[in-house]
Image: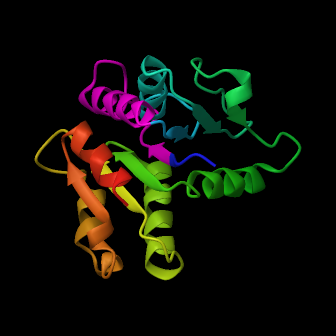
Amino acid sequence: MKKRITFIGSGEDRPGSPIYSLMQEAGRLVAEQGVVVVTGAYGGAMEAAVRGARRACGEVIAFALTSKPVCALLETREVRSWNNLPLEVQFGLRLGNLLSSGGFIMGASGRTGTMVEFLSFVNLASKFWTDPKRLSILRTEETLPDVLQFLLDSPLLAGIKDRIKVTDNSAEAVVWVLSS
């Protein structure tokens, strides 16, 4: 199976915004390495990663909940969903599939859903994973959103801080994640 990198972030980032641009560039760089771009199937930062992968003719897999419309850039064959299951079960399957990648790139503008994915990474990295999966957080300003800065400074990350890198450079984020 080809290596996969999951892109997580806000569905509200718009084309032209700094995070959208960083995520698009990272998606392109990952795809140029022959690595599959995995997303949560929606707009914003996830769409940006898909758009970047498209520029490099890369492979994309997206995991969707059936209650939301998916990113218009996605082709039907690229979207995985579970129409016949309750939404709560779909959520768990989507999260599990997103977390089964070899590494992660996150847009720092994410909100609740992104924080769930981030905390799931923290939980698995600190308690269960034996392989050193990495997470790169792309940011556009010197400061991070308060909740994310709080989490990065908290004891929750004891023992796994060496698996997380915060940067404002897409190429640096990709090299970091792919070097694990």
Q: Is residue 114 magenta?
A: no
Horizontally, is 114 left or right of 107 in the view? right
Horizontally, is 64 left or right of 125 in the view? right
Report which quarter residue 95 is drawn in: bottom right
The number of callouts visible is 0
Tell me what residue is drawn at x 67 percent, y 30 percent: 78
Please tell me whether residue 157 is drawn above or below residue 172 in the rendered image.
Answer: below
Q: Give the camera-side residue of 38 and 67.
A: 38
Q: Which residues are magenta?
A: 5-33
Q: Give the camera-side residue of 91 and 167.
A: 167
Q: Give the camera-side residue of 86 and 33.
A: 33
The x, y position of residue 26, in whole percent, is 34, 35
Horizontally, is 129 left or right of 176 in the view? right
The x, y position of residue 162, in whole percent, is 27, 71
Please tell me whether residue 87 is drawn above or below residue 43 in the rendered image.
Answer: below
Please tell me whether residue 165 is drawn above or below residue 172 in the rendered image.
Answer: below
Q: Is residue 23 magenta?
A: yes
Please tell me whether residue 75 is drawn above or below residue 153 in the rendered image.
Answer: above
The x, y position of residue 55, in whole percent, is 43, 18
Q: Can the viewer see residue 13? A: yes
Tell me what residue is drawn at x 28 percent, y 53 percent: 176
The x, y position of residue 69, in whole percent, is 66, 26
Tell me what residue is drawn at x 49 percent, y 81 percent: 127
Tell me what residue is drawn at x 38 percent, y 47 percent: 105
Image quadrant holding the C terminus, namely: bottom left
Outermost right residue = 84
Q: Can the viewer see residue 138? A: no
